Image (tube, rainbow, N blue to C red):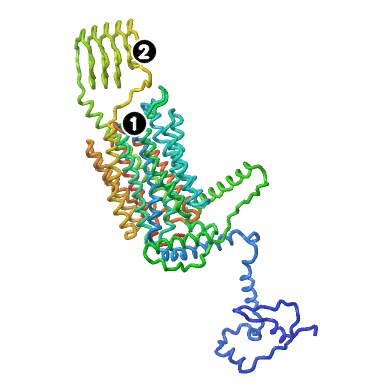
Amino acid sequence: DGYRNTNQVSDDYRYQDGNYDAPNDGYYRGGDEPAQEEDAQSDVTEGHDEDDEVYEGEYQGIPHPDDIKEKQKKRAPAVDDEYRDRADLMAERMEDEEQLAHQYENIIEECGHGRFQWTLFFVLGLALMADGVEVFVVGFVLPSAEKDMCLSSSNKGMLGLIVYLGMMVGAVLLGGLADKLGRKQCLIISLAINAAFAFLSSFVQGYGFFLFCRLISGLGIGGTLPIVFPYFSEFLSREKRGEHLSWLCMFWMIGGIYASAMAWSIIPHYGWGFSMGTKYHFHSWRVFVLVCALPCIASLVALKFMPESPRFLLEIGKHDEAWMILKQVHDTNMRAKGEPERVFTVSYIKTPKQVDEFIEIQSSTGTWYQRWLVRITTTLKQVWDNVLYCLTAQYRMNTLMLAVVWFTMALSYYGLIVWFPDMIRYFQDEAYESRVKIFDEEEVSHFTFNFTLENQIHRNGEYRNDKFIGMKFKEVRFEDSLFEDCYFEDVRSSETFFENCTIISTVFYNTDLYKHKFINCRLINATFMMEKEGCHIDFEEDNDFLIYLVSFLGSLSVLPGNIISALLMDKIGRIKMIGGSMLISAVCCFFLFFGNSESAMIGWQCLFCGASIAAWNALDVITVELYPTDKRATAFGILNGLCKFGAILGNSIFSSFVGITKVVPILLASSALVGGGLLALRLPETRDQVLM
């Protein structure tokens, strides 16, 4: 009884579901089971190919060694993940993600496209609108803010660039966090930062604080673009994705139109405000800054009622929450279609293997700031790992090509958007200077000037016993002139100078004719009393209405391009859309050589904006589709941050050539567009693939 023969071994295994399982009760089992009849044995082996008889014990019930190995492999996943190689875990996760991508696409198709997606469309559209408004705010308030804050040219330039700098940092940081903390949560943080500091910037008086507030406000709004598009795309099916993401881009245009309309209706009413003493002033341009924060606040409130992206929740293993949201999407759309009886048939969704190393800190471990420090550093390390992942071999080439396309597009677009208004202003200045009146060797005595002198040059004149009372000098120059026994009272001036003049026994009372406006002059017994307080800088008299009109028309001109790109995005593909739009925009740049008037520049600006918007829309779509869910917002943030860097360079380079030459800006913009457009044609087409 202590020994077992070969025939008894066969009784110790039972064949179940293609595997052999040995008894585990610990007892010896004898051959008490009835043996198979001969006919039954022949039935088992009937039709068996002799080529398959590689193991003679196969039909005696003895397991083949290969079967034992296969059985061990099937049991391998039961081993704790901490004892498995990370490469194996990543391979398993990649396989899970591929299965999830196709299953999720089928689920979204079952949920349908209806009321839920349109509601989310408008909520996220308000966030995108806030981003469009932010780009225009500083440019619109500068003509008024420069007077209140006494801004020099360098200060104005820094204020214009600081918003893009904040957007660049915010895009990378908040885009990366959206892949770790969630789309909804990071978008709420982004909008809250923008709304808070935009509101605060309307009240601060000093230049330094205002600059800081606009920087942080830009940082907040910079995170909207990298989050909005991945967020919305994860509720769209493959057939709807390209078209509806392009429709979403229209809200950026609406933001520009809204900012232009509000600026035109509010800022010129300088009295819309209040003052507290002589130090605190709240003028109409500050009201405009407050009004521009409304789209951001509206989106922030509405977003509280929207769910998190279920695709993101599945990536981090939250199956039940994702399932509930998808059921909500399904039920909302079915009720809107009049089919409330339709049941959500999905019961289980594949979730990828979780391989991230999360650090759980007990409340009793260390101090509160130590626990927060560990959480923050861990999260930032994960964000940095995601950034590096976008440069791995699998995505390196796509990332580099997209980076070049984004950068060249931003360099040319934002550079020309600043260059157009500057060139229009330059043409205005030229026309203004051509109408200058010149007075030579005039002699005026015992005369009272109580009216405005504008755009005049007085040379070799003599003024004796004259009075200048309650008047304004605007763009007036006195050269080699004599003022003797004259009296100036309550005089205001802008761009007015006295050069090589002789001023004898003359009184200046309550004027802004400060001593720096007297260039190489001889002041003999001249008296300056009660000089006007305030800024000593002369400011250009801008045609505010023309600035608003140019921005309004530039924003409105992209409407046809938006419609065309939305309708054709899924028909001709993303790559052809980017390449074609950029090459057409490059051709439009060459026509700028013929723009020698204000109306011509406005027309070419509208044409350029309308042609280039399709490339922007297609870039947003393809960037979303080229990267997996857990890296999507990070990659978008990196590329959008590079875009803002291109905007900073474009603004600086193009504006420096205003009034010098048109050749360099036009050739630089057109060559960048041609190079980026040709490179874009080498990107992979993504319109037929599911979101990974």
Horizontal side of 438 relative to 617 (left or right) equals left
Determine whether the residue tagged by mark 1 lies in a helix, strand or loop. loop
Q: Work out which quarter of the rendered image holds the N terminus and state it.
A: bottom right
Which residue occupies the extreme right position in the image? 2
Q: Which residue is mark 2?
A: 530
Label at residue 272: 1
Instruction: Count the marks.
Output: 2
Q: Tell me residue 510's x, y (percent).
A: 33, 14
Q: Residues within 10 Å of mark 2 (few under 14, many from 20)?
A: few
Quadrant hosting residue 134: top left
Which amino acid lies under the numbered mark 1 shown in the image of this protein? Trp
Front residue of 463/689: it is: 463
Quadrant hosting residue 243: bottom left
* Residue 158 appears in the figure: yes
Residue at mark 1 to residue at mark 2: CA–CA distance: 29 Å
Residue 174's place in the image compared with 209, above or below, is below
Horizontal side of 81 relative to 275 (left or right) equals right
Which amino acid lies under the numbered mark 2 shown in the image of this protein? Met
Labels 1 and 2: the sequence-earlier one: 1
Q: Residues within 10 Å of mark 1 (few under 14, many from 20)?
A: some
Front residue of 367/33: it is: 367
Q: Tell me residue 317's x, y (percent).
A: 55, 59
Residue 72's place in the image compared with 326, above or below, is below
Q: Nearer the viewer, mark 1 or mark 2?
A: 1
* Residue 391 appears in the figure: no
Residue depicted at x 46% and y 31%: 209
Determine whether the residue tagged by mark 2 lies in a helix, strand or loop. loop
Q: Tell me residue 642's x, y (percent).
A: 43, 44
Quadrant hosting residue 26: bottom right
Front residue of 392/690: it is: 690
